Image: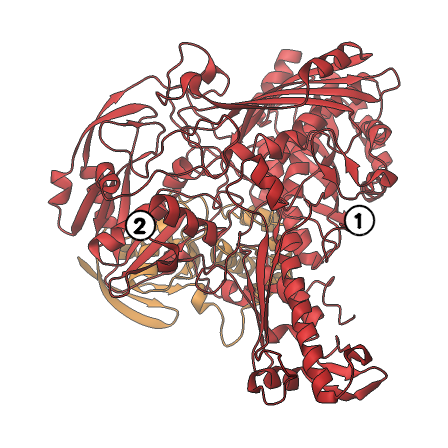
Chain colours: A orange, B red
Amino acid sequence: MTAINVVVNGKSYTREVEPRLLLVDFIRDTLSLTGTNIACDTSQCGACTIHLDGQAVKSCTVLAVQADGSTLTTIEGLANGKLHPMQQAFWDQHGLQCGYCTPGMIMAAAKLVEENPEITEAEIRHGLEGNLCRCTGYQNIVAAVAQAAKA
Amino acid sequence: MTQALVGTSVKRKEDPRFIQGRGKYVANLQLPEMAYIAVKRSPYAHARIEAIDTRAAEAMAGVLAIFTGQELIDSGVGKLPCGWVVPGCKVPTRWPVVPVGDKVRHVGDSVAVVVATSPYIAEDAVEAIEVSYTPFAAVTDAKRAMQPGQPVLHDDIPNNLSYTWALGDRPTIEQALSASAHVIKLDLTNQRLIPNAMEPRAAVAQWNAATEEMTLWTTSQNPHPIRLLLSAFTLGIPEHKLRVISPDVGGGFGSKIFHYPEEIITPWVARKINRPVKWVASRSESFVTDSHGRDHVTHAELGLDAEGHITALLVETWADHGAYLSTFAPLIPTAFYHCLLSGLYKIPLIYGITYATLTNTVPVDAYRGAGRPEAAYVVERLIDLAARKLDLDPIAFRRHNFIQPEEFPYQTPVAMLYDSGDYNRLFDKAQELSSYSELVAAREAARAQGRLVGIGVSGCIEASGPAPSKVAGALGSAVGFWESSIVRVHPSGKVSVLTGSHTHGQGHETAFAQIVADQLGVPMEDIEVIHGDTAAIPFGMGTYGSRSMAVGGSAIVKSAEKVRKKMLKIAAHQLEAAEEDLTYDFNGGGVYVKGSPSQKKSFFDLSLGAYTAHNLPDGLEPGLEEQAFYDPANFTFPNSAHICQVEIDRATGEVSVQKYYAVDDVGNVINPMLVDGQIVGGIAQGIGQALWEYGAYDESGQLLSGTFMDYAMPRADVMPAIHTARTVTPSPHNPLGVKGAGEMGTIAATVAVAHAVMDALAPLGIRHLDMPFTAEKVWSAIQEAA
């Protein structure tokens, strides 16, 4: 077991973890932040996307020990008193149905727009090709990201 | 009646929790002292288990117990039943965990169960279990499975043939075909698909030793039928001691209808070790354990007379059911398939037969559309080829054979009685929306430049909301197809709506609340829709077959009507007026004297009054809660006209969908935003089938497409913008006038894209390819044609 310290959604945690523990399992099981979902085991779906030191990462592809000393934001920490514009846009545009891919999708999209505020539809589609959604056909997700980019 | 939230795009009540990471999915549950299950699975498609050595695994720190199949059987666990048994059907034996001495029959079959203090340890222990197998040859092809000399999966099912099912008189149809001016013949496959809801299946169970009650949280589209199957067939805990909860479920698409081994194993273990336990599928497990869809091999013939009218249709299908019969498997390639073979058309004579075979693959059952996409694909492929043969525009040829508006209700020769429709109007709208003639002109211009551009048209029918229960029973169903509801008005005037339908993305919490808001004249925020808990809801059939609004919504209307009636009685007594002199206030709730709105009892007054019971008419029971069970008279028959344009890269064979137009008639619409969401999402799955998705097995029974890297689902960058519109032909037989909206997009899109690809390749002389139209397949076809 190895001790790690991370700041998640503004709160500091020190925990003993197995070296092999995936960051997503650390977030979900150790910290009980279950908003981050798991939908595959090959880093293909993006459901577990979070922000790690300012970058959108698939948290199934990072070990918890690699995150030692890092600052993380999960879907639970995105709203800041009121909904983040990306959350609001997903709601406004019906960008979700079953909601399972949504946290990862919102986290990926929020970073996308932050990095490229003038984002085009083609760039949105390309930027989200690492996040799978089985319900929406992406149309309203793309519309939501476009709305948030304008917000 | 006004207020009229129905028909408007109310934003979803359920979204705030999902967008903030507060979804209540099964895998999120954490209970004190929770233990974790992992299942040892067969790497072989067909093998006998000779021995299982669990000693090394049992010795590992953190391993609590390991169970094998025989232990479950010895404790009384039953075989997984089939819930739809057609005449003559041989149902193979399926144990939740295959016992030693018996055979595993597909890769992923359950062999042993590990229980440990963490999921990581459970996985380690699974690896440490040693299983000795005697492997056998496998069969993975539906048609070959019933030929002599093939490996036999179940000793008591010769030739791997579970049943044959036929509808119509073959000699009559064959005679009509031979007398036809033209006969279009086609051999096609409708490939195996893997549903892949984003949330993998999961189960959590908690045993209460004091009350001997079990609670099971499971990712199900229909918790009540699952409880019934667990009680009566598999787990053996009686229904009144078993609570099944399906909280937020992350998509289903059919795959979460069925009764699966893990939802037997998990509560069985919880009781055995007297601790809460959790099982969560990895995606790799989902691929080899969730029931798959489609997988038909078909020969079909369509006859035409000299004037281009359809004379007869013959369809022969080999339907792969996989290694066992999944819960509703025999329904799909029978009543849900052959009974839809009339499509939108007047086809006087139809004969269909299905050979249902067993192979060393994951069981096949309902997947979005379930039988109806397979039927639509057969009919529409033939229609398209017929138009081509007669050198007619595909829409003109369809119109030539449509059932006409004045012919409804229309009795097809394949049992279905279509409720309503106006297919000409549907296609008028689709042609207008797509600027069809301009599309055609643009295609001709592109062709003149040597580009491979194609236009695809589909005209599809769906039978949604299976009904009525009596007919379902006669066709082999073990369950009914009604739905229940309770509208509970609390003393404070707030409203709980309990439904036996289940939402796993559809947005029922919003759409059902819209209905009740209109029915009772109360604000949306005063209404909560409750679903998915057998302890809260009397009984319910769940959600599948695009049934929830037509059946579940109608049940809610019935309950709300009863509530209004009771409120009228109370108000009449309190206002000292005759009921016929009163009117319900749909714009604010409550009851007032006709022509004198100030003489009113408010919704709050009447709600509270019903519970204080201080001033109720003699003989009227206190309380304000009404229940209804609604058993529909018929299916509803949504229909669609989709038109799309594709271009194929001649150098690579890659197909891109450039334009997509969808006009759907789903009857009246409760929430246009939600209906469009269903249609567009469905179209994505349909495009996925046409272009990329394929549950491919090799001859040894290994699944070749067992990850998201190999099983190619649509991603954001390959989806076109989809333009939707509607025509509205209400269903005449349910109180909302609605038809199903959940599956139409999927049914129609597969066909439309397939036709566009075939149209693009037609100048090269290519008549038919089987899906999916991957770049490699299309490129090869182009090379061969050159």
In the image, taking residue B282 as reference, residue B587 lies left or right, namely right
- Horizontal and vertical percent position of residue B351: 68, 21
* Residue B7 placement: quadrant: bottom right
Number of marks? 2
- In the rendered structure, find residue B49 and report the number of the disc placed on it: none
Give the crowd class for mark 1: few <14, some 14-19, many >=20 residues within 10 Å.
many
In the image, taking residue A3 as reference, residue B557 lies left or right, namely right
Badge 1 sits on which subunit? B
Which secondary structure lies at badge 2?
A: helix
Is residue B467 placed above or below B101 in the rendered structure?
below
Residue B13 can be seen in this image: yes
Which residue type does callout 2 highlight? Thr
Give the crowd class for mark 2: few <14, some 14-19, many >=20 residues within 10 Å.
many
Closest to the observer, B271 or B60: B271
- Horizontal and vertical percent position of residue B702: 38, 26
* Dot 2 or dot 1, earlier in sequence: 2
Closest to the observer, A122 or B199: B199
* Residue A9 placement: quadrant: bottom left
Closest to the observer, B291 or B585: B585
Judging by the rendered image, the residue that carries numbered circle 1 is B729
Screen quadrant of the C terminus of chain B: top right
Residue B589 can be seen in this image: no
The alpha-carbon separation of the residues under discs 2 and 1 comes to 46 Å
Badge 2 sits on which subunit? B
Judging by the rendered image, the residue that carries numbered circle 2 is B266
* Residue A50 placement: quadrant: bottom left
**Tags 2 and 1 in contact by the CB under 8 Å rule?**
no
Is residue B536 placed above or below B145 in the rendered structure?
below
Screen quadrant of the N terminus of chain B: bottom right
Which secondary structure lies at badge 1?
A: loop
